[in-house]
Amino acid sequence: MRRAPIWLAALSLGLTALLAAPSAQAADTAGPAGRGPSLYVPDANPQAYRQAYELAREGKFLDAAGILAMVDTPQAVWFGDQTPAQVERMVRQVVRDADEDDAVPVLALYDIPGRDCSNYSAGGAADTAEYKEWIDAVARGIGSREAMVILEPDALALLPSDCGQDDAQGTKTAARYLEVEYAVDHLEPLRGTRVYLDTGHPGWHTVDSIVPRLIKGGVGHASGFYTNASNYNTDDANSWYGKLISSCIAYVGAGGDVAACPNQWWPRADAQSWLDANVHTPPSRMTHFVTDSSRNGQGPWTPPAGTYPDPQDWCNPPDRGLGARPTLRTGDPLQDARLWIKTPGESDGLCLRGTPGPEDPERGTVDPEAGDWFPEQALELVRFANPPVLPRS
């Protein structure tokens, strides 16, 4: 809140008593053994501060404190659609602020051509040349400072060929792989930068489906991959999916057939037996991963059966909660961090669930556009947070 308005500072002081004691599972963002930098807390969406102010005016002090606690938790800073000059300046400012705080910023880069298959979060660079110029600007902005880069959510899980945007020759999909690999090759070599590639989430691609995409995208030159960005799968499901993907990459790297790898739907005992028999690479030499726990406190939403033509279970589902706080100490030798990648409180888009709209039929309201603040959802995330975002009396 380094550039928060004066009225917010006054509000924060008024809520200090509510936040005086840390939650039993407050964010543990320090590096291994408590050494090294923490994770960076960026400035929040201004509408979050406005919502907290309005809640406090209404006497809803616990809700107001919850909103402030949510935005005062480390989370990713998203970049996309800026010009190269703009993104260079903005990235440089974030990594400089983080460096002053002895913290590691998480940068979510979201500017790939054909982003989101031109759906709710459409946009991005016009072509490969423009994207390369944009990535070069990001690299200049980071320089030699530390950063964790979440590279292009959905870029590999949702290829142009997956949504009918490609030609018969697969030109756009081939370009997508080149764009992702270009970003890896120009960001990962920076002194303090770690780049992670997209896998979607455990309820989407099977292991043998996503691993070839990761390899083509250059995961062998990156720090690793991420899963569950902007989704709701549990920490347990995410960590298991990550382990299976990492193990399959190691198996394929040793000459194995990706089709033989166990996927997330196998019985765990059977999958673990397969790993024990076929993967002997030490964790230090395997591909690592990070996960998103920003909105998974209640797990995935199960839409009412037969209610909607397209339930869109990923799109502003009701009654979800904040998940476990971000940390660089996961206790898993393959998992580098648990992060808040999706900005909690910001909308997924205009969710119609297969109906004519304009209202979201599950909520009875018109959802904000993707990336805009969604006050109702923000309150749900605080109230249903697991673990709680505020200490319990």
Image: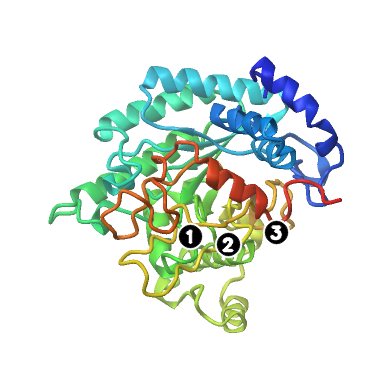
Q: Quadrant of residue 236?
A: bottom right
The mark that comes first in sequence, 3 or 1, is: 1
Residue type, mark 1 in image: His
Give percent across and percent down for residue 144. Answer: 58, 24
Q: Residues within 10 Å of mark 1 (few under 14, many from 20)?
A: many
Tell me if residue 1 comes above or below residue 357 in the rendering.
above
Residue type, mark 3 in image: Asp
Give percent across and percent down for residue 322. Answer: 63, 51
- For the question of whether residue 192 can be seen, the reply is no
Residue at 45 percent of width and 72 percent of height: 256
Q: Secondary structure at mark 1?
A: loop
Q: Which residue is mark 2?
A: 238
Q: Quadrant of residue 305?
A: bottom left
Circles 3 and 2 in contact, beta carbons < 8 Å: no
The mark that comes first in sequence, 3 or 2, is: 2
Tell me if residue 22 comes above or below residue 266 in the rendering.
above
Give percent across and percent down for residue 298. Answer: 61, 61
